[in-house]
């Protein structure tokens, strides 16, 4: 596995792969890799002969007071895991390489889809994500890029961006990897205390409760959201949102919507956890 830091070196290597007609897959990450990331790598491998994993803690997607400085940086351990996983290239650029003129003035922003869910509480977050992913797409020019479905809103925004900006890249969503007790894998789980860790699967369980209620005919989604939010709060979660949304627009769902996203974000002690599930109701 090659470990590259410079944009020009990445371009050179990918150009060589293209000459050899190799399909190239990109898995963008912020590092601190866990088994969830490795499942994204395996997904990329199913489609491509050459897999690039980028590790870059992107400053522009962190708001003031968010955990940019505290975000775990574990490049040596990440490189080891990627080598074992058979990845061809680790791209770990510096902030200066990704933001060559310092304060960034060119932004990619996807309208409307960023207004709901995590976007409502984190202004500018998805603009930072879309901008850095555009940069990575321009550098690596992959055939395929893989993102986790755990970040459903991010995936929806990046799909839209790739289509509307005419990136010739197939965006693939990979299912959320989970611990044995159902907790979605996340770099932030490491911040949970033992007691919080034992409680954390309740987030997914509440989403499943919501799905069961909807399947059984509940259509007052706002009342359902309120009920489950109170229950999560009783278990010590500080809930940012628990929402039944339209899976396409990500806006709060109405009783006639059929393709639903049930998503939640909640702080449990220090870390903010997110999770979601989707649900398609039969027509009529
Ligand atoms: O999902 C992430 O880890 C980040 O948002 C991404 C896509 C790597 C962009 O920085």
Image (tube, rainbow, N blue to C red):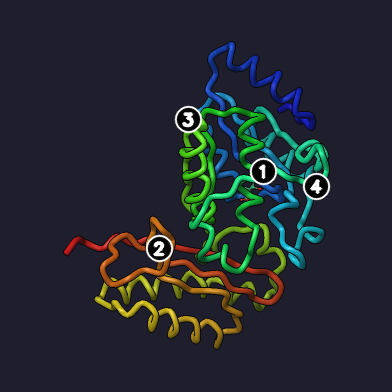
Q: Mark 1 or 2 closer to N-term?
A: 1
Q: Earlier in the sequence, mark 3 or mark 2?
A: 3
Label of residue 132 in the image: 1
Label 1, ligand 1: CB separation under 8 Å: yes
**Whole-number angstrom distance, CA of label 3 to CA of label 2:** 27 Å
| Dot placed on the residue nearer the N-terminal end, 4 or 3 | 3
C-alpha span from label 2 to label 4: 36 Å
Q: Nearer the viewer, mark 1 or mark 3?
A: 1
Q: Position of residue 124 (x, y in %)?
A: 65, 58
Mark 1 residue element: helix
**Residue on which disc 2 sits:** 261
Query: What is the distance, in whole Å, between disc 1 and disc 3 at their CAs?
Result: 23 Å
The reply to whether callout 4 and callout 1 are in contact (CB within 8 Å) is: no
| Foreground disc of the pair 2, 4 | 4
- Residue in view at x 56 percent, y 64 percent: 118
Q: Quadrant of the N terminus?
A: top right
Which of marks 1 and 4 precedes in the sequence? 4
């Amino acid at each position: 596995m090659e470990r590259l830091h410079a944009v020009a070196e990445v371009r050179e290597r990918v150009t060589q792969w293209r000459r050899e007609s190799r399909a190239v897959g990109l898995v963008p990450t912020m590092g601190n890799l866990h088994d969830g990331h490795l499942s994204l790598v395996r997904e990329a491998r199913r489609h491509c002969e050459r897999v690039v994993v980028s590790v870059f803690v992107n400053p522009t997607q962190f708001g003031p007071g968010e955990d940019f400085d505290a975000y775990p940086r574990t490049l040596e351990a990440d490189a080891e895991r990627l080598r074992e996983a058979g990845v061809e290239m680790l791209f770990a650029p510096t902030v200066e390489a990704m933001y060559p003129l310092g304060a960034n003035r060119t932004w990619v922003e996807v309208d409307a889809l960023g207004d709901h869910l995590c976007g409502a509480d984190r202004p500018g977050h998805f603009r930072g994500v879309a901008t850095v992913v555009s940069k990575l797409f321009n550098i690596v020019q992959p055939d395929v890029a893989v993102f986790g479905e755990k970040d459903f809103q991010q995936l929806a925004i990046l799909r839209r961006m790739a289509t509307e900006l005419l990136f010739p890249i197939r965006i693939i969503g990979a299912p959320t990897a989970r611990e044995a007790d159902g907790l979605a894998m996340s770099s932030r789980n490491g911040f949970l205390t033992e007691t919080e860790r034992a409680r954390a699967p309740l987030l997914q369980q509440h989403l499943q409760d919501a799905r069961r209620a909807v399947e059984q005919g509940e259509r007052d989604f706002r009342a359902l959201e309120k009920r489950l939010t109170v229950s999560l709060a009783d278990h010590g979660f500080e809930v940012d949102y628990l929402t039944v949304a339209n899976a396409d627009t990500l806006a709060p769902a109405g009783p006639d919507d059929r393709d639903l996203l049930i998503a939640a974000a909640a702080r449990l002690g220090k870390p903010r956890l997110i999770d979601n599930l989707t649900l398609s109701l039969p027509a009529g």
